[in-house]
Amino acid sequence: MHPGMERVLLSKDEIEDRVKELARAISEDYQGKELLLVGILKGAAVFLADLMRHMSIDVRIDFMAVSSYGASSKSTGVVRILKDLEQSIEGRHVLVVEDIVDTGLTLNYLLEILRARDPASVRICALLDKPSRREIEVPVDYKGFAIPDEFVVGYGLDFNEKYRHLPDIYVLKKEVYQG
Ligand code: 5GP
């Protein structure tokens, strides 16, 4: 294991099983509808790539990038759009695909922006959820795992842009992110 890691929180096999279940549930719910998956860069890229490959309905994808944490591990509540969608979502079914919901500030803001564009529906799919950290209630319609309040990396999640490529999800040692 990498020296910066405390322990494995979720193995790649556990993640794969859960992602398949989520893909099945989403495919059933959106049967007969056209679905647009909106991945939130960069953290959700790996999750979205796996999720869509297990879906049995036609989906389209697009991406948004927002700034939230910068180089720190704490949320500032300041969210800025760095990259917007390439297409209109008016009248379309949108599923936001996010890596992790922590305070909820990022998703709350994103939902407001997306709802203002008059989609047919907007729902949220998040791989990870830290319920104990929530500051604003956001409806997470499809949730992979509820996890404790620890800083995690791997499977798309980074610390200072590192560790996104790791196939498992790890708890990062406190001394690494608290300096
Ligand atoms: P929120 O606005 O819900 O507080 O923050 C959501 C974003 O914070 C996530 O999309 C993710 O980028 C980042 N984040 C929150 N908790 C963690 C964590 O444990 N590890 C990593 N790598 N990023 C996190």
Image (tube, grey):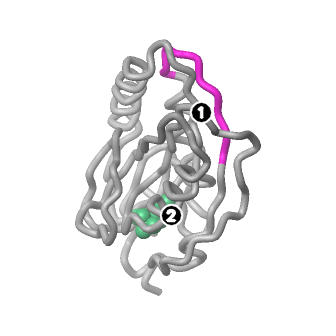
| 178 vs 66, nearest the viewer | 66
| Inter-mark Cα distance, 1 to 2 | 20 Å
Q: Is residue 5 visible?
A: no
Against 56, residue 9 (above or below) is: below
| Number of marks in picture | 2
- Identify the residue position indicated by label 2 in the image: 109
For the N terminus, the image quarter is bottom left
- Name the residue located 55 percent from the left edge and 27 percent from the top edge: 35
Amino acid carrying mark 1 in the image: Gly
Span colored in magenta = 54-63
- Identify the residue position indicated by label 1 in the image: 91
- Name the residue located 62 percent from the left edge and 54 percent from the top edge: 42
| Residue 60 inside the magenta-drawn segment | yes
Against 104, residue 118 (above or below) is: above
Q: Is residue 22 visible?
A: yes
User: Which is in the foreground here, disc 1 or disc 2?
Assistant: 1
Amino acid carrying mark 2 in the image: Tyr
Q: Judging from the image, what secondary structure is the residue with disc 1 in?
A: loop
Determine whether the beta carbon of the residue marked 2 sits less than 8 angstroms from the nearest atom of ligand 1: yes
Against 83, residue 141 (above or below) is: above
| 76 vs 70, nearest the viewer | 76
Q: Tag 2: Cα neighbours inside 10 Å, few (<14), some, or many (≥20)? A: some
